[in-house]
Every structure is written in C-alpha cells, then in structure tokens.
Image (cartoon, helix red, strand yellow):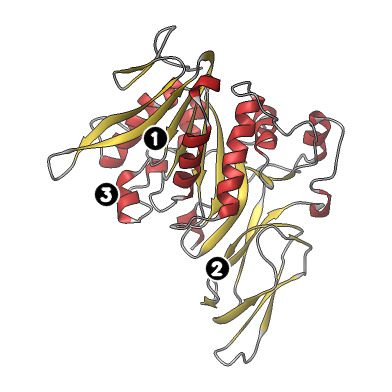
Amino acid sequence: MTGGSGHANGFEIGSVMVAPGTSADVAIPVTQMATGYDSVLAVRVLHGAKPGPAIFVSGAIHGDEIIGTAIIQRLAREILPENLSGTVLLVPVSNIFGFLNKNRYLPDRRDLNRSFPGSASGSLAGQFANAFFREVIERTTLGIDIHSAAVHRYNLPQIRIAAGNARLVELAMAFGAPVIMESPLRPGSMRSLAHDNGVEMLLMETGEALRFDRLSIETGVAGVQRVLAHIGMIEADDGLGHVGIPARANKSSWVRSPRGGVTHRVRKSGDPVRKGDLLATVGGLFGENPQEIVATTDGIIIGHATLPVVHQGDALFHIAHIAHPERAGEHIDSITEAILASEPEGPAEPLLDEDEVL
C-alpha cells in the first residue's frame, strides 16, 4: 500500500514541503503547451496538525464534469488543517484542457480515465495520468473521485465501488449517497490503477455536465466529511450510528424511447419503481400517437435525460436493479446487518461509461 510522502514534520509534494497544521497550493508541471508555457496540475494540500492517513478528492477528470470542482471548492473552505489528523489533497480539475474547452476529453481526443498509469514521455493524456499517479495516488491510501452525467442527462447522487469489497461498502455507507453501485474495474481507469496499488477508491456520480446543483454539492461535501470522520481524520458524526439499509445494486439498465417525439416525464431520478410502472409518455409534434414508457425492472431511477425532445432509441431512464427498493433506508441494528441485508444477487456487471450510453 502506498502512503503519505515526506518527513515526520511535513508533507512533501511537487518539491514543496507543507508544515503540519497548514495548507499550500502546489502547481505540478505536467506538459508544455503549444504556447511554450507549462500546463500544471493544481493541488491544494491540507496537512493536518496531527498524524493520520493521506487521502485525495478529485474532480473533472472528464473536463465537462465540473460538479466535483464546486464540491472541492466548498471542502477547501470547510476543512481546516489545524483540526485535521492526516492529509487531504484536493484536485479541483484533473483535466484542465477539457475543463477549459468544456469538453469531456483532452485535445488528443483521449479519455483521461482510460489512460492510467500513463507515461511522462507519452501522449498528452498519458502525461496527465502519469503526473496524477506519481504525485497524488502514490501519496495516499484512499481516493474520492467525483463525476457527473453527460450534457442533458442527470445522475442521482450515487457512489460506485469495486465489487465484493466489504470495506468499500462501509465507506460508501458512511458517505451517505442515496445509492451504492458495485461494478467491475475498467482497464486504464483511475480506480483500476488505484486498486492495483493498494489505494481504496470511491467514485461519486452526481448531477449533470457543465452544471452545478445544490443537491449534488451538499451531498458531496457532507459525504466526504462523513468519510473523513469515519476514518478518524476529523471529529464529526460519520452517520453510521443510525444505520439504514442502503439502496445497493450491481446491475443497471437503460430504458430507451420507443419512438421519436416529445416526452412528458412522470418519474425522475431517486424514485423507486416496479416493473411496468409508467415513467413517461412520448408522442408526436401534436402529441399524437402517444406511447407509454415503462420500467423494465424493479429498482431505483439513478439517472434520467433532461431534454424532452428525443429520437427513437434515446436513453431516457437509468434504473439500478434493486429487488425491494421500498426497503431502502429502513432502520437496522448494525452496519454488518445492513451490509448483509443489501447484498446484491449474482455477479456484478460493468456500468456503461457516459460516452457508451449514447
């Protein structure tokens, strides 16, 4: 397992030594742009007054998924190094080129989250992946990476974790998002590389690309703070004293429009549904020949399209397969019982990435 870098009285990163109980903004050079100037990875280091683990929180690994940036800005104001045990590395924008261009990818059209571990002498994406790996992942034992849905789609706040890991389920429960999704690791992803190097990872999905929303920001900020409390980095309630059965799934499916036209939703993200429940109707330009769009499985809606105008086959509702969605949140006596009560059936299936859904 990797861990914090540096000396007993400081935390070293990017040739900068951060003293206990202080913070520092570190600009890590990554690559040279066409202008001849360096492009950097910006990291705020919150180095606690007391010893403890080192974790990172990152956003915008896909440049248009900016909700993580807003969450990290709030965390930067609210986490005080003088009250912290251990070290928190905040990376508000992992993909600065995509962030500036309002685009998911880097200028070389590569997906940064499929480019790990990368190489310092490789492609643009490879250079950024390698810098993040060397300077952030290798210095920590836990990471929380924040994503969003694509443009014109919304994701219910949810935590995605590697399948079959009880410790990650416990951390996800402490985070307190409405849904926990288990999914196999994808080659070249940050989560996969972190796993291979002994670093635990939570991936938060929430909100819509290029947009901020209050629920996502408040859920993300509170969730990260509860995880910090759970692992002893701050003095606060981790939320697990009042344990409820988590909404937990390892399979999901998309419901697509049976025709082109204009939709009218009657359900939204967060709603529990049963197979056959009405989700929306879709009709022609005058509302003619309306067709019902119904749930194809029992579960909870974890994502939906926000545009009413659709083509035939457009993905409209993302449903997490949960056998008894109405039981989610019911009080139970212990964390162990809650984990067992929500254990998904069968092997986990990979979740489609945002560019694979369309």
Judged from the image, the secondary structure of the residue bearing numbered disc 3 is loop
- Residue indicated by mark 1: 116
* Residue type for callout 2: Thr
Is label 3 or label 2 in front?
2
The percent position of residue 264, horizontal first and vertical second, equals 63, 78
Q: How many neighbours does mark 1 have within 10 angstroms: few (below 14), some (14-19), or many (20 or more)?
A: many
**Disc nearest the viewer among 2 and 1:** 2
- Classify 10 Å Cα crowding around label 2: few (below 14), some (14-19), many (20 and above): some
Q: Which residue is mark 2?
A: 306
Q: Is residue 259 above or below residue 75?
A: below
In the visual, does 118 lie left or right of 56?
left
| Label 3 – label 2 distance at C-alpha | 29 Å
Residues 6 and 24: in front is 24
Q: Residue placed farthest to the left in the image?
A: 36
Query: Residue at 29% of width from left, 29% of height from top?
Result: 28
What's the residue type where badge 1 is placed? Answer: Phe
Mark 3–mark 1 Cα distance, whole angstroms, equals 15 Å
- Give the residue type at disc 3: Asp
For marks 2 and 1 on the same chain, the one whose residue lies earlier in the sequence? 1
Is 279 left or right of 351, judged from the image as shown? right
Residue at image mark 3: 108
Q: Nearer the viewer, residue 2 or 9?
A: 9
3 and 2 marks in contact (CB < 8 Å): no
In depth, the one of 315 and 205 nearer the eye is 205
Q: Looking at the image, which is closer to me, 57 or 301?
A: 57
Q: Residue at x 31, y 41 (%)?
A: 125
Mark 2: which secondary structure?
loop
Counting from the top left corner in percent of width and height, residue 257 is at 59, 74
